[in-house]
Image (cartoon, rainbow, N blue to C red):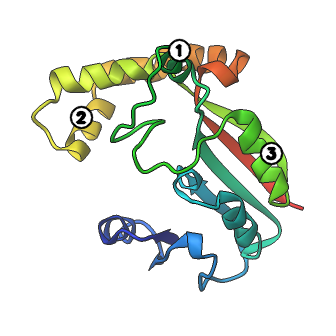
Amino acid sequence: YGLDTSKKELSIASKKLDCVKNADISSNKIDLPKDFDVVVLSDVLEHLKEPASCLKAFKSYLKPNGKVIISVPNVACYNMRFSLLLGQFNYKKYGILDDTHLRFFTFKTAKKMVESAGYRIMKVDTTPYLIRPLFHIYKSLFFRNSGDNEVNANVLNSKLFSTYKDYIFPLENFITKLWAGLLAYQAIIIAKKK
C-alpha cells in the first residue's frame, strides 16, 4: 500500500505497489486494513502539523508485533549549526530546510516523539552527510540541462557514485555513527508497537 496526496506520485507508485490511495495521513482517518507488519513513514512526519498524532493513528493499522520505520531530517546537522551561527535559517526547495517542512527534529526529539506515540524503539540509524553535499555540486556541474529524475538516475549510474558507494560510503557511514547528532543528515528509527 502507498498513500499520498499527489496524483503524480501515486501514478509512479502504482507501477510498483499493489495498491495506492489518495489519502491525507494528517486526517488520521484512512480506510486501510488493520494487519500491516510494517508502516514506513519516510520523510513524511516533518511535513505534518501533528506528527505524533499521526504516529499514534498508524498503530491501529499494525499487527500486534508490527513495526514502524520513520526517517526525519536532523536539524542539528553540522551545516544547520553553522548556518545558525551565521544568523541564517533560509528555506530551500529540498533538504533539511525544505520549504514544505512544518516540524524540525533532532535525534533526541524524534526518539521522544516515537516513544510518546506508544512505540518501543528497537534501533536508531543514520544517513551520513559528510560527502553528500558534494553530489549537489557534481549534479550542477555535469547534469545541469537534465530534468530532476534524469539527473538523479545519471548520478546514481555514474562511475563516481559507484566508487563512492563501494569505497567511501562505508567509511562515511562509520564516522557518522560516532557523532550522529552532528554528522547525520537524517535520523532513521525502527520501533515496535507497545
User: 143 or 169, which lies in front?
Assistant: 143
| Residue type indicated by callout 3 | Lys
Query: Which comes sooner in the sequence, label 1 or label 2?
Result: 1
Q: Quadrant of residue 117?
A: bottom right
Query: Can you give x and y, in whole percent of width and height, for residue 175 in the image?
Result: 64, 13
Which residue is labeled 2 in the image? 154
Q: Give the secondary structure at mark 2.
A: helix
Is 187 drawn above or below residue 141 in the view shown?
A: below
Of the residues tagged 3 and 1, which is closer to the observer? 1
| Residue type indicated by callout 2 | Asn
Which residue is labeled 1 in the image? 85
- Residue at image position (49%, 77%) is 23
- Residue at image position (76%, 59%) is 67
Of the residues tagged 1 and 2, which is closer to the observer? 1
Residue 183 appears in the figure: yes
Query: What is the crowding at mark 2: few (fewer than 14 residues within 10 Å), some, or many (at least 20)?
Result: some
Task: Identify the mark at residue 108; answer none if there is no mark.
Answer: none
Asked whether the residues under the numbered discs 1 and 2 touch, taking CB atoms below 8 Å apart as contact, a structural biologist would say no
Spatial CA distance of label 3 from label 1 is: 26 Å
Q: Residue furthest right?
A: 194
| Left or right placement of residue 63 versus residue 6 in this view | right
Give the total number of marks visible in the rendering.
3
| Left or right placement of residue 32 versus residue 96 in this view | right
Is 101 drawn above or below residue 181 in the view shown?
A: below
Which residue is labeled 3 in the image? 112
Q: Quadrant of residue 95?
A: top left
User: 66 or 24, which lies in front?
Assistant: 24
| Residue type indicated by callout 1 | Leu
Residue 1 appears in the figure: no
Of the residues tagged 2 and 3, which is closer to the observer? 3
Query: Which comes sooner in the sequence, label 3 or label 1?
Result: 1
- Residue at image position (64%, 40%) is 105
